[in-house]
Image: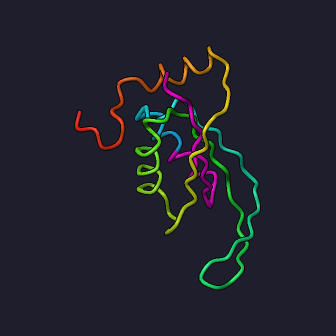
Amino acid sequence: MERAVFVYTTYPSVVEAEGAGRALVERRLCACVNILPGMVSYYWWQGVIERGDEAVMIIKTRTSLAEAVRVAVREMHSYTTPAVLVIPIESVDPDYHAWIIAETKGQAPAGDAT
């Protein structure tokens, strides 16, 4: 049975996150995205500590689509180096897992020619 994964990323605005999130769902690369506004980040960038207001996006998909999601996020992202972290799910409710798989059916995994 194919595993479910979360893909974690951040965006500089809720507007950008919503546009990318809707596109990912429309393409059936994921079953759902959650967008959490109001995050503050401190990070190193080009030798300087930066502060940014960001929105977190959690993308719910299946393992075989994780690479396609990563590619799509990078293509649509305004950051030069966006955070794209694939997080394996240890346990998931069987009905919820079936829903994730069903809503992403028909999508060819990354690198698949079909």
Q: Nearer the viewer, residue 99 or 17?
A: 99
In magenta segment, residue 101: no
Q: Is residue 2 above or below residue 38?
A: above
Give the residues drawn in magenta, as a range.
1-20
Q: Nearer the viewer, residue 11 or 58?
A: 58
In magenta segment, residue 8: yes
Residue 110 on image: x %, y %: 35, 42
Looking at this view, name the residue that lies furthest to the top. Answer: 95
Looking at this view, name the residue that lies furthest to the left. Answer: 113
Q: Nearer the viewer, residue 51 or 47?
A: 47
Q: Quadrant of residue 12?
A: bottom right
Residue 3 on image: x %, y %: 54, 29
Residue at point 49%, 58% (across, down): 77
Q: How is the image coloured?
A: rainbow
The answer to whether 2 appears left or right of 111 in the picture is right
Residue at point 62%, 55% (across, down): 10
Residue at point 72%, 80% (across, down): 49
The answer to whether 34 appears left or right of 74 in the picture is right
Image quadrant occupied by the C terminus = top left
Residue 75 on image: x %, y %: 41, 56
Residue at point 58%, 21% (across, down): 97
